[in-house]
Amino acid sequence: MPLKSRMSLKTTVLLLSLPTNWDLIVCKTQRLNKAFTVFYLYSSVYFFKLTMPSYASQLRFNSNLRLINISFFYFYHSLTFYFNFITSLFQTFHLPFFLKLKFKGKGYYIFKNSRNTVTPQFGFSHRIYIYSFSILVKFLSKTKIFLFGLSKNDLIRNGFRIKQIRPINVFTGRGIRFAKQIIYRKVGKVSSYR
C-alpha cells in the first residue's frame, strides 16, 4: 500500500510498500544510449513491469520493511498522474471493495453454489445465472446480499447485473436496490368516484 509521496523543489519521492506474497526484481537496461531501470512485480497470479529512466530517478528497496523508495530528481505535473496510477494499482491488492444489495417482494429469493454462481428467482420460468469469478458473495439475511472483492469494476458490474434482473417498481417499491439507495414511490391512479 502506498505510504506517501513527498515532493520538494528538487526531488519527488514515492514510497510504496510491497504487498505480501509479492516479489520484486530490479534490472538496468540500456536502449538508444539511455539507461532505464525496469522493475518487475509479480505474485503467483499477477505480473507488472514498470520502466523509469535511470538518469531521472533512483530506486531503493528496503527488504526489512518491504518498502520501495522511488526518488525523481525533478518534478513535472504528469508525474502526479503517474503517482496516482501507481497508488490505485497497489491499492487494488490491499483494499477490498464492498457492495450491499436488498430486495423486496413476495416469493423473491436468491441462492448461490460453491463456485459463487448467483441464481436469483424472481418469478421467471427460467433460471438466470450470474458468474462472479473475482468477488465473493455472502448472504446477510433472506433479503440482503453482501458482495466484496478486490476489483471494483467486477464488483459494480455484477451488482448492476443482479439489479437489472428485477428493477424497482416505482408504484409498489418491489425489486432489487442498493443499500442506502433512496426510492421515491409514485402515487397510482386515483379514482374520481371516491
Image (spheres, rainbow, N blue to C red):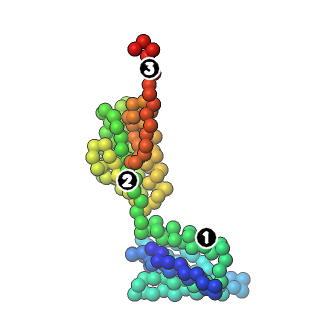
The residue at the far top in this view is 193
Vertical arrangement, residue 178 with respect to residue 154, above or below: above
Residue where numbered disc 1 is placed: 81
Q: Position of residue 166 (x, y in %)?
A: 42, 37
Q: Residue 190 bears which disc, if any? A: 3
Q: Nearer the viewer, mark 1 or mark 2?
A: 1
For the residues labelled 1 and 2, say whether their Cβ atoms are less than 8 Å apart: no
In depth, the one of 148 and 103 nearer the eye is 103
Neighbor class of circle 1 (other Cα within 10 Å; few <14, some 14-19, many 20+) is few
Label 1 is placed on what type of residue?
Phe
In depth, the one of 187 and 2 nearer the eye is 187
Vertical arrangement, residue 153 with respect to residue 68, above or below: above
Residue drawn at point x = 39 percent, y = 31 percent = 172
Residue drawn at point x = 42 percent, y = 66 percent = 95
Of callouts 1 and 2, the N-terminal one: 1
In depth, the one of 64 and 112 nearer the eye is 64
Q: CA distance from mark 1 to mark 2?
A: 30 Å
Asked if residue 52 can be seen in this view, the reply is yes
Asked if residue 29 can be seen in this view, the reply is no
Residue drawn at point x = 42 percent, y = 82 percent = 66
Residue where numbered disc 2 is placed: 147
